[in-house]
Image (cartoon, helix red, strand yellow):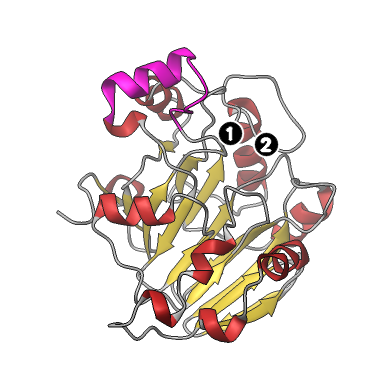
Amino acid sequence: MKLTFLGTGAAEGIPSPFCSCATCTNARREGGRNVRKRQCVLVNDDLLIDIGPDLFASCASLGLSLTEVRHLLVTHSHLDHFSPENLLLRSKPFRLATELPEMTVVAGPSVWMKWELSGGRDNEAGIVRVPLLPGETREFTPYTVRSVAASHHLRMGDAMNYILHDGETTVLYASDTGMYEEKVWRELEGLSFDAIVMESTIGLRPSGKEHLNFTDLALMIERLESIGAVTGRTVKIATHFSHQGVEPYEETKQILARMGIVCAYDGMVSVIGPDVYPSDAFNSSDPKS
């Protein structure tokens, strides 16, 4: 399973245009991996996780096309994870020369309400909606998608993390969330992950209810290890960074490396599989090179 990180930033991105903190200032000056667009991941070439406001810019800068995407998983309705305009721009008047496959969109009630309020029409956007709640499973060949309740977007209560299995590889995608509730841990017992992609939004700041800092990230991984879901062969990736919670890329990379965790960056590609060792899972080049 190939994971391409189109964006690794939280809601404001890095640098935030309305901020002059040290992390944002450094990102403007140094560029490169210090710059983070809003969170989005492409799985293989046919499945997208979240569809936020930086999708078009991310694909343009990385030289990527999404014309083969057949499935979209939306974690929740916050603006950095779901921008209905991106689906509206799939309609035929915006792509006269191109035929797209029908796209299955998996999402919770608050996402579908936002879609309805945008004026979007499923047939015009070429989508098939699949309403989902935490704790449910769906099959989309070759993928099995299982949702778990995220500790996030608590006023709505339908934010989800996803367990994705393609017949060989199993990945836990855990953004956005705070520490899991006990019922989620019970659901994860008996599973084994080849990789976990987990948020660490607030990094060096104190613990929060709806996001993880580095300490809570470590506790989440320790709990996964205690139930056998994470082993020494599991690739561990941190992502979804806020400019108000992390240092520049190199410093953040070193902090996470000491924890045995990879610091994701925009354009990072990871190939995950049961026969792939963590040290061999990453391609440091851009997808277009």
Mark number displayed over residue 271: none
Horizontal arrangement in the rendering, residue 238 relative to residue 271 (left or right): right
- Residue 25 located within the stretch drawn in magenta: yes
What residue do we see at 67% from left, 42% from top?
223
N-terminal label among 1 and 2: 1
Horizontal arrangement in the rendering, residue 14 relative to residue 270 (left or right): right
Indicate the quadrant containing the N terminus: top left, top right, bottom left or bottom right: bottom left
In front: 131, or 111? 111
What residue do we see at 58% from left, 53% from top?
81
Judge whether 149 appears above or below 14 on screen.
below
Mark number displayed over residue 201: 1
Reading the image, the residue beneath label 2 is 211
Q: Which residues are magenta?
A: 14-31
In front: 279, or 94? 94
* Amino acid on which disc 2 is placed: His
Horizontal arrangement in the rendering, residue 264 relative to residue 80 (left or right): left
Q: Secondary structure at mark 1?
A: loop
What residue do we see at 51% from left, 49% from top?
197
Few, some or many residues within 10 Å of mark 2 (<14, 14–19, 20+): many
In front: 209, or 62? 62
| Rendered location of residue 48, percent (x, y) | 47, 65
Q: CA distance from mark 1 to mark 2?
A: 6 Å
Few, some or many residues within 10 Å of mark 1 (<14, 14–19, 20+): many
**Mark 1 vs 2: CB contact within 8 A:** yes
Q: Going by the picture, which residue comes out furthest to the left?
A: 289
| Rendered location of residue 236, percent (x, y) | 47, 44
Indicate the quadrant containing the C terminus: top left, top right, bottom left or bottom right: bottom left
Work out whether residue 169 can be spotted: no
* Amino acid on which disc 1 is placed: Thr
